[in-house]
Image (tube, helix red, strand yellow):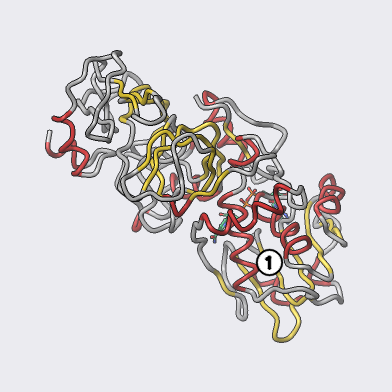
Amino acid sequence: MQSFLSSSLFPPAAAKLVASVSVAAGTGARNSGGAVIAVVPRRSAAGGGGRCVAYASSSSPAVNTAEAGVVVPATMKAWAYDDYGDASVLRLDEAVAVPAVGEDQVLVRVAAAALNPVDSKRRAGKFKATDSPLPTVPGYDVAGVVVKIGSKVKSIKEGDEVYGNINEKALEGPKQSGSLAEYTAVEEKLLALKPKNLDFAQAAGLPLAIETAHEGLERAGFSAGKSILVLGGAGGVGSLAIQLAKHVFGASKVAATASTPKLELLKSLGADVAIDYTKENFDEQPEKYDVVFDAVGQGEKAVKVVKEGGSVVVLTGAVTPPGFRFVVTSDGSVLQKLNPYLESGKVKPLVDTKGPFAFSQTVEAFSYLETGRATGKVIISPIP
Ligand SMILES: NC(=O)c1ccc[n+]([C@@H]2O[C@H](COP(=O)([O-])OP(=O)(O)OC[C@H]3O[C@@H](n4cnc5c(N)ncnc54)[C@H](OP(=O)(O)O)[C@@H]3O)[C@@H](O)[C@H]2O)c1
């Protein structure tokens, strides 16, 4: 039991609370102790002989949160994996324990989640050295409703509609209990109120991508009057890098690359020049840019089209000087700062039209993301 709990989705503190839950199943009785916990290990039918996530017994209690009167169950449906690998390692688990809520966290009832390439790379084991222990419920991006708050939470209350990227550092110990689940626990500082004009599916696609675009532009010293070339302009990050550069930072000129069918889209996002990478080599053109924002992994070519003294932001692949790479930091205040641009419609979420995918189709959604052809964000909604 001890070894199970220590490798489960719960931190040791949560495991301690197991014993404190005594309400009966389905009563909706209140647990004044706060966190909603019940952990009795058993194997998932789908899990075969693999390691367990953190299962509650079938007689696990449901608990009301005091203020909102919302019943938070002890267990939830979540996608999980026990081993690194391709999308086939994902399994839908019907009885994963709802995560405990830390004092600086809130519990979000997930309405929609979005997939990011980092979910795939993490699942493939690329970040094994700094990942949290398996098993993992994946998912960084979330939009949903707050159903419980930690004792030190100040600015968010139960019932608030929020969105955010739940992992402050994308690669350093990302949470074991992610957003591809009915509930996820998130630090208050990583969330913002959902823009009022957006639905949950639209909002879920924004956090990690828009934070990356914003952080990349800031780190590159991008500012009004400068020019930029965005490589991969139709992707989750690129589509937002174009919009932020043009409509928030005040770019003098935005160029972007994509394949033929996506060129009009680039223009609608704010690109002045849309380059068809299937027909022309951007690095053979005479034009040079103050900033090149590489969301494809073309660092070597990217540095050829930057002005002297300019910056080349590289999100993936090899870095060629003067290019630099960074890993996004999640920050709710960035989302809050950008909310007026989203609410005015100056910056728009781009949701891939193959989706939103139903929760039950999460494996298909991952397979689609992994084609590298998604246009904007791959969304999972509704959840469950
Ligand atoms: N360092 C960080 O903190 C950080 C943060 C976020 C993302 N990333 C990384 O950045 C990359 C992009 O992320 P994302 O979420 O934007 O991915 P994505 O949404 O999956 O990108 C898909 C898009 O890439 C375009 N694309 C593919 N090859 C292209 C090429 N040669 N030239 C131009 N466009 C091309 C595709 O358009 P076509 O169909 O027209 O080819 C498609 O629309 C990923 O590798 C991701 O892991 C890093």
Depicted 156 relative to depicted 248: above or below: above
Q: Which residue appears at 53% of the width and 49% of the height?
A: 192
Looking at this view, name the residue that lies furthest to the front.
Answer: 67
Residue 80 sits in which quadrant? Answer: top left
Name the spot of residue 164 as percent of width and height, x first.
52, 47
Residue carrying label 1: 293
Is 185 positioned to the left or the right of 192 in the image? left
Name the spot of residue 145 as percent of width and height, x first.
50, 34
Depicted 100 relative to depicted 268: above or below: above
Name the spot of residue 299 as percent of width and height, x first.
64, 69
Q: Which residue appears at 32% of the width and 41% of the height?
A: 101
Amino acid type at circle 1 is Phe
Please state which of residues 206 and 342 is positioned toward the viewer in this rendering: 342
Name the spot of residue 95 as percent of width and height, x first.
33, 23
Where's the N terminus, which quadrant?
Answer: top left
The secondary structure type at the circle numbered 1 is strand
